[in-house]
Amino acid sequence: MQPTTTQPLLEVSDLSMRFGGILALNSASLNVLPGSITAIIGPNGAGKTTLFNCITGFYRATSGAIRFNSGNSSVDLIQVLGGPFKATDLTDPRAFSTRLYYKMLGGSHRVALAGVARTFQNIRLFDEMTAIENLLVAQHTGLDRNVVGGFLRTGSYLKSEHTAVDRAFYWLDKMGLGEDANRLAGELPYGHQRRLEIARAMCTQPKMICLDEPAAGLNPNETKALSEMIQMLRREHDVAVLLIEHDMGMVMDISDHIVVLDHGEVIAAGTPQHVENDPAVLAAYLGADYETGVAL
Amino acid sequence: MSHTEQYNFSKTALRGLRDAAFAGVIALIVFGPMNGLILDGYGLDFHLDRPFLMAGIVALGRFLLTLSGCLPAVRQLRERLMDFSHRGVTVEQPGDSQVRWKVLILLTIITGLCAPFLVSKYWLTILILALIYVLLGLGLNIVVGFAGLLDLGFVAFYAVGAYVIALGAQYWGLGFWTAIPVAAVLAALAGCILAFPVLRMHGDYLAIVTLGFGEIIRLVLNNWLDFTGGPNGVRAPSPTLFGLEFTRKAKEGGIPFHEYFGLEYSSFYKYLLIYLVLFVIVVALTLFVHRLRNMPMGRAWEALRENEIACRSLGINHVTVKLSAFMMGAMTAGIGGVFFASYQGFVNPTSFTFFESALILAIVVLGGMGSIVGVIIAAFVFTLVPEMLREFADYRVLVFGVVMVLMMIWRPRGLLQIRRKAFKRPRPVYTRPGEAQPLHAASAGQSL
Ligand SMILES: Nc1ncnc2c1ncn2[C@@H]1O[C@H](COP(=O)(O)OP(=O)(O)OP(=O)(O)O)[C@@H](O)[C@H]1O
Ligand SMILES: [Mg+2]
């Protein structure tokens, strides 16, 4: 790991995730720096998606810690899920009350509120809503949600809706979906759906966006456009990107930092040049094809 | 007629004859024992002419049906009926004119306000019942149609509303007008109490728990004799108009409505008042639900129905969103209950059986889950048609079942297509790119 002066945005330390007999993550650690593009690579079943699900709060890690430091606040992404009570809570009323609070109101949505957005390996859009509505739902937590105000169409409500619609159109244009605003998300072509999912994640105004195989199923042209869009996100919107991707060309092109997972363990981490030449990576990744020289 | 058409026609005619013969034979087999053998004391009379007549009618009908396939109009109709690829959702175009809708709505409101003066008292009561079902349909539509939570015990909240006014009047002197908000709040509370433990469940489990809840409420009402009067029920008060009662004789020196205005006594006035108040509430609620659909809360409900996991990834607390849908639905049902009790003047548990829940669900399904206009039409269909066809009351449940099956085949997404609002590109208001103001910091404390 290179020495850093800035504090990492995301700190994952010794994270383990066990499903019955399978140890999907085995003491994995990684850091994501603010405004960086970090790629997670590894063979199928290495535990990449599991790592994402732990970070974004869809799985509760068996052990380990995840901290998210944005601005001057630091959030424990495991605590906000609301864990079971512990015996020590009985002696410490403050620990007890925070645990009770997160037990009642915690959950994976808290992770998103802390500033982590994500997309899914298998696309999850609101199929029977229009593209623009998908993006409006994403802005839900920031809108004027007063039911009475909304019914009476008060000024503050209209203003909040107006801004939301405007931001939604902005993101549609950014992702090249301007024409699709009033089409049902489920009817869009596959490539557009992938981009709409990214636009939707960006509408939550995250500090970090986690993309799970965004280029899967795209043709080379679309992949190239996607690479540019991801770099644009970082450049213009100051988000850190955490990326799972099998397309090595794309990964090597755009990432600052690469983490290699195999069987739930981090076997290498570093710059693309460093990872490219790491023998352990080649062995894990290519297995028997080691000698054939597939471009890594 | 060209040569090929003639050929086609004769081919169809031939096929028609074959089909007709086949249908005739089957009809003979079916009708033979049914119409042909008449029990007479201990013996049997044979009336073979009857089954043959029936079979003849069936065969002729079948023949004409096949033959009608030659007419393009019939063929088109048949294709449209057989089109199973019906999409349930369309999006309006940004430029679509809304004038037609506005005129239609205005006409409906005027008709609705004039209706009670044009019909008999009997039909007025039926109209009230229809409006109550519209209310219930709109409420369940929020839960099932928008939020996608299958609730089979919706009638429980209806019962809560009805018993709030009846018991409230008996024990605490609650009047009609105060009962409306009180029932709304209490029904919403009941929805909250039910929802909290069950909202972590999905689909079938949720359906079973709500079904159980509906039955529990009914059984409690039935068996808690001291408090609810059990199967004997409770009297419910009629509404009053600025303190004027609608009874023949006012109690304790008050003046009844008809005396105050020097009118002949008739219970028509009571129903008229109930109808008009209910109508106003239904119109307001329809507008409210319509606007809700395009408000953050309504959008969150629909998003939750579409994909719960995606919702959570966007920071939406699925528990509170579901809770809000449940409570909103329960509230509507509670208000419906107050009107029902007041209109009947009396409530007992037999009005709140599972059949009632099923009927309301059928209204929502028939109307097209999530379509407001569809639900309103369906509510009228389900209350008015049985009244018009009183003679066939015995077959009501049968017809009900047949309609549901046909619906599932032809229009699984309901009679009316759901229309989604289109958005126009707005005047730019926000500084781009990368607005500095953090949304999350402002709202991290609460999430609904
Ligand atoms: N919910 C679960 N229950 C049980 N086992 C699981 C679960 N999720 C993942 N696993 C297991 O954990 C391991 C890692 O899976 P994961 O989906 O994280 O792989 P991946 O690296 O994302 O693979 P791919 O590149 O194919 O997407 C696999 O062996 C998988 O079977
Ligand atoms: Mg995966």
Image (tube, grey):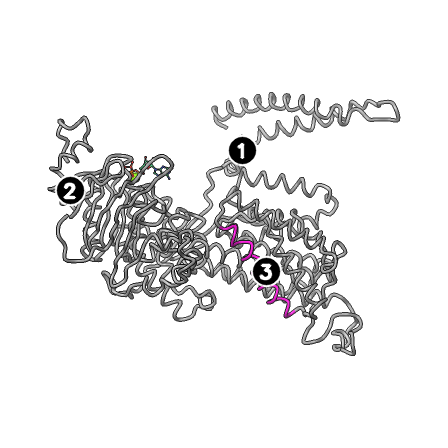
Quarter occupied by the C terminus of chain B: bottom left
Relative to the observer, which residue lies in front, B428 or A126? A126
The image quarter containing residue A163 is: bottom left
Q: Rounded to the nearest whole Å, what is the CA distance between mark 3 and mark 1?
A: 56 Å
Does residue B357 appear left or right of residue A268 in this picture?
A: right
Relative to the observer, which residue lies in front, B315 or B99? B315
Q: Residue at x 64, y 30 (%)?
A: B61
Q: Residue at x 60, y 23 (%)?
A: B19
Which span of residues is magenta-colored? Answer: B177-199
Residue B71: assigned label:
1
Question: Quick check: is the Cβ at mark 2 less than 8 Å away from ligand 1?
Answer: no
Q: Quadrant of ligand 2?
A: top left
| Pointer 3 with pointer 1, Cβ within 8 A | no
Seen as rendered, the residue at the extreme right is: B41
Q: Which three-letter amino acid code belongs to the residue tagged 2?
A: Met
**Residue on which disc 3 sits:** B187
Element type at mark 1: loop
**Residue on which disc 2 sits:** A252
Q: Residue at x 49, y 56 (%)?
A: B323
Element type at mark 2: helix
Q: Residue at x 66, y 41 (%)?
A: B399
Chain letter of disc 3 in the image: B
* Percent x, y of residue B272: 69, 66
Q: Are marks 1 and 2 on the same chain?
A: no
* Percent x, y of residue A98: 39, 60
* Percent x, y of residue B438: 29, 63
Q: Is residue B120 visible?
A: no
Q: Which three-letter amino acid code belongs to the residue tagged 3?
A: Ala
* Percent x, y of residue B189: 56, 60
